[in-house]
Amino acid sequence: MDIIHVCMNVSDADESADWYVENLDFERTWEFTTPDGETDNVYVAGGNGIEIQLSDTDGEDDFESGDAWDHLAVSVEDTDAAFDRIDNHGVVQEPADNVEAGARTAFIEDPDGHVVELVGPIED
């Protein structure tokens, strides 16, 4: 079995998709609206083809993450450079070496407050 996609509820699927495309170099892959016309779904994917489904239902724009959802990890070539260039909507953790994980990481928020971890190599 393989992971196909992760779905996140967002207040504006197009705005969120634009954020992932502009800041994390994802690509829009496809989209659809439910037959009742109430929910727009826009899919974006990174280079490995795993998609994020950004789902926006009319009138719903206040979400609680709960404690089951934590973050989405995205690989980057340079954590500090990515952190500096991304138009984030909140800093959870500035770039730092995570020696135990063998990576340099930072945590930011997307337009709806979903936490995104930037994972890059530790500089020598």
Image: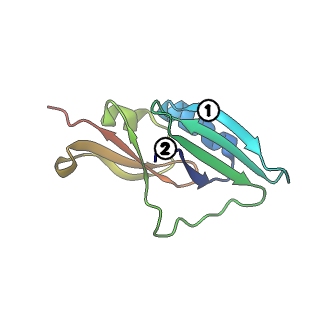
Tell which residue pokes out farthest to the front in this image. 1
N-terminal of the pair, mark 1 or mark 2, is 1
Q: Residue type at mark 2?
A: Asn
Describe the element under mark 2 as helix, strand or loop: loop
User: Dot 1 surroundings within 10 Å: few (below 14), some, or many (20 or more)?
Assistant: some
The percent coordinates of residue 38 (x first, y second) are 81, 54
Q: Residue at x 56, y 44 (%)?
A: 52
Quickly name the residue at label 2: 88
Is 78 above or below relative to 88?
A: above
Q: Is the Cβ of the residue at disc 1 closer than 8 Å to that at disc 2?
A: no
Quickly name the residue at label 1: 28
Q: Residue type at mark 1?
A: Arg
Disc ID at residue 112: none
User: Dot 2 surroundings within 10 Å: few (below 14), some, or many (20 or more)?
Assistant: some
What's the distance in space between the residues labelled 1 and 2, CA to CA? 19 Å
Name the residue nearer the viewer: 86 or 47: 47
Viewer-nearest of labels 1 and 2?
A: 1
Going by the image, does 106 lie left or right of 1? left
